């Protein structure tokens, strides 16, 4: 399979959320979104937009201390944060397999720490940039890009 990657540049938290929302609208049952990026890059901001695109109406926050938050939207939404996980076994004990193979959408922050567990067809989102810098958001999926159009000027690579 050839991964298709879309890169978008955002200049504000609102633009980052808007990109997440566009992706969220395109997601379906069983989709997994694996997010990577430095602390403070905007992963949780992006996830707030994803959740909005999935019609989640409740406030969305990072589940750093509880590890998993569940939200009701047009599909069940599972938000995992692997930042504080000690081992892959700990994540599996949380029911990871049930989340990623279920009828909902699973969003995983710090997914690079769980790489061996992430399904091959997951959507990978990497966010680069800190502080007041613009964010470069790279979205990759093995079968097709999710986003077209522009927040800024997207660059697609095949």
Image (spheres, helix red, strand yellow):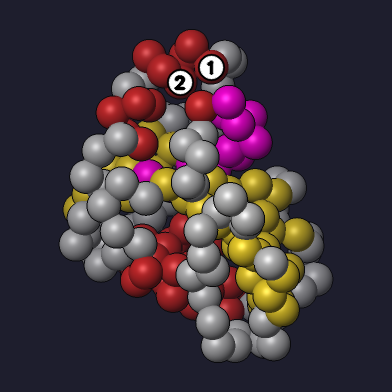
Residue 133 is left or right of residue 32, and the answer is right
Instruction: Name the spot of residue 101 as percent of width and height, x first.
Output: 30, 35
Closer to the camera in the image, 69 or 141: 141
Residue pictured at 35% horizontal, 26% vertical: 97
Closer to the camera in the image, 19 or 32: 32
Residue placed under numbered mark 1 in the picture:
88
Please tell me the numbered disc located at residue 147.
none
Is residue 107 found inside the magenta-colored segment of the image? yes
Task: Tell me if residue 17 can be seen.
Answer: no
Quadrant assignment, res 137: bottom right
Q: Is residue 28 above or below residue 70?
A: below
- Kindly check if marks 2 and 1 are in contact, taking CB atoms under 8 A apart as contact: yes
Residue pictured at 45% horizontal, 20% vertical: 91
Instruction: Name the spot of residue 14 as percent of width and height, x first.
Output: 54, 77
Q: CA distance from mark 2 to mark 1?
A: 5 Å
Is residue 66 found inside the magenta-colored segment of the image? no
Residue range (magenta):
106-116
Residue placed under numbered mark 2 in the picture:
91
Q: Residues within 10 Å of mark 1 (few under 14, many from 20)?
A: some
Which residue appears farthest toward the front when viewing the image?
1
Task: Tell me if residue 26 can be seen.
Answer: yes
């Amino acid at each position: 399979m050839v991964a298709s990657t879309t890169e978008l540049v955002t200049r504000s938290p609102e633009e980052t959320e808007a990109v997440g929302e566009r992706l969220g609208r395109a997601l379906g049952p069983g989709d997994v979104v694996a997010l990577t990026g430095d602390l403070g890059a905007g992963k949780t901001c992006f996830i707030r937009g994803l959740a909005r695109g999935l019609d989640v109406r409740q406030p969305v926050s990072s589940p750093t201390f509880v590890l998993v938050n569940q939200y009701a939207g047009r599909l069940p939404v599972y938000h995992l944060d692997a930042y504080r996980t000690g081992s892959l076994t700990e994540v599996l004990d949380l029911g990871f397999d049930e989340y990623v193979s279920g009828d909902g959408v699973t969003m995983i922050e710090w997914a690079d720490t769980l790489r061996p567990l992430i399904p091959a067809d997951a959507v990978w989102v990497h966010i680069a940039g800190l502080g007041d810098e613009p964010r470069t958001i790279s979205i990759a999926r093995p079968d097709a890009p999710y986003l077209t159009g522009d927040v800024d000027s997207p660059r697609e690579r095949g």
